Amino acid sequence: MKFSSLLNFAATALTVFKTSEAAYSATGKNNAVYWGQGSGQESLATYCKAGNIDIVMLSFLRDWDASSASFNFGNACGTDGTCPQIAEDIVTCQNLGIKVLLSLGGDKTLGTYGVSSDAEGANAAKVIYNMFHPKGSASVKPFGTAEIDGLDFDIENDNQNGLASLVVEIRKLWTTKTLLISAAPQCPYPDKNVYKMLEDKNAKVDIAWVQFYNNPACSFNNDAGFKSSWATWYDFVTTKSGNSNMKIYIGVASSTSDSDYFVDASTTATRSASMLTQKSFGGFCLWDASSGTAKVTNGVTYIQSLKNILESKSVTKRFLNGINRAFTVISP
């Protein structure tokens, strides 16, 4: 092997070894983050371009019912009800392979949301479709012609009424793509906010990112409590949920308001190691993008650390693939 060929070999293998695989995979492991409420947050596109997230939830559609809806995305929108920068950034993120979901709900003290019946849930779906689908009939379209990839339900008001009906109806209305539907139950089982939706076989929710924080008995910083809660939720997702292909994510927090529940990257890797090999494990879900970027250890952001953990099981395979490609490059 000539020296120049050896250099080509090493460069090709190393490039593949170092390449981040930031793009959503329905069957792989994904890094999901909430964006929209962070203190001093950067633009949505800034986080997508970092190359370490696969799903982003726009938070929040904070007030909604069967007849109207309104949102709050922090510092990212104008006073006219439109968000042109978010619209542009949605397309940027999607072009990078990242799924963009609209999150409904959030802190119940900051918004009023929910319905009282299945019929109202179906009507709420129509409201959301008309506001956020490019072909919807609302007079003001927050994202213009940009089309989201799905909905997330971060419900915290103990009202599960009509949620499954909302999902079923909006799937019917939204014919231009198959929506990705997620929900964020609290870790105490059964959850009081989205449990019925998660078990509904017509709604067929795709993802459950369980919030393993804000509840000391089952939070991620409580090793034994977390692992016991994870086993319970994993059993639900794999044997009782309404979607046999549902994925379960470990929901963690890095924001200042949740600082009591923050777990450093090294401990996160150790504590989650056994989950990474489970068939229905989907990845991590982080609250939130700005704080996960601000927390840096040895030059690595917490978001990147989570992505590194998810990719650790495939590093050897990627390196070997790089070696194979390198041999192809230098073969006569």
Image: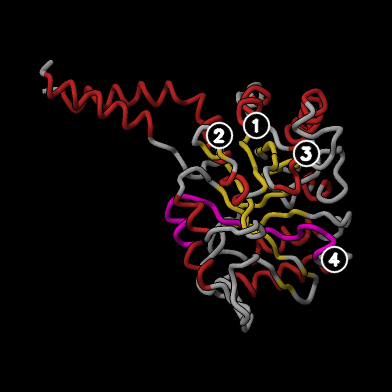
Q: Secondary structure at mark 1?
A: loop
Q: Amino acid at mark 2?
A: Thr
Determine crowd level at label 4: few under 14, some 14-19, many 20+ residues with C-alpha closer than 10 A: many
CA separation, marks 2 and 1?
A: 9 Å
Quarter assignment of residue 80: bottom right
Return the x and y of residue 299 as percentages of the image width and height: 49, 36
Which dot marks residue 115? Answer: 4
Q: Quadrant of the N terminus?
A: top left
In the image, what residue occupies the spot 57% across and 35% down? 306
Q: Is residue 104 located in the magenta-colored stretch of the structure?
A: yes
Which dot marks residue 264? Answer: 1
Where is 299 relative to 322, above or below?
A: below
Where is 319 relative to 258, above or below?
A: above
Q: Nearer the viewer, residue 137 or 104?
A: 104
Q: Nearer the viewer, residue 56 or 77?
A: 77
Return the x and y of residue 163 as percentages of the image width and height: 79, 58
Whether residue 114 can be seen here: yes
Q: Amino acid at mark 4?
A: Val
Where is 2 relative to 72, above or below?
A: above
CA separation, marks 2 and 4?
A: 43 Å
Q: Quadrant of the C terminus?
A: top left
Q: Amino acid at mark 1?
A: Asp
Determine crowd level at label 3: few under 14, some 14-19, many 20+ residues with C-alpha closer than 10 A: some
Q: Amino acid at mark 3?
A: Asp
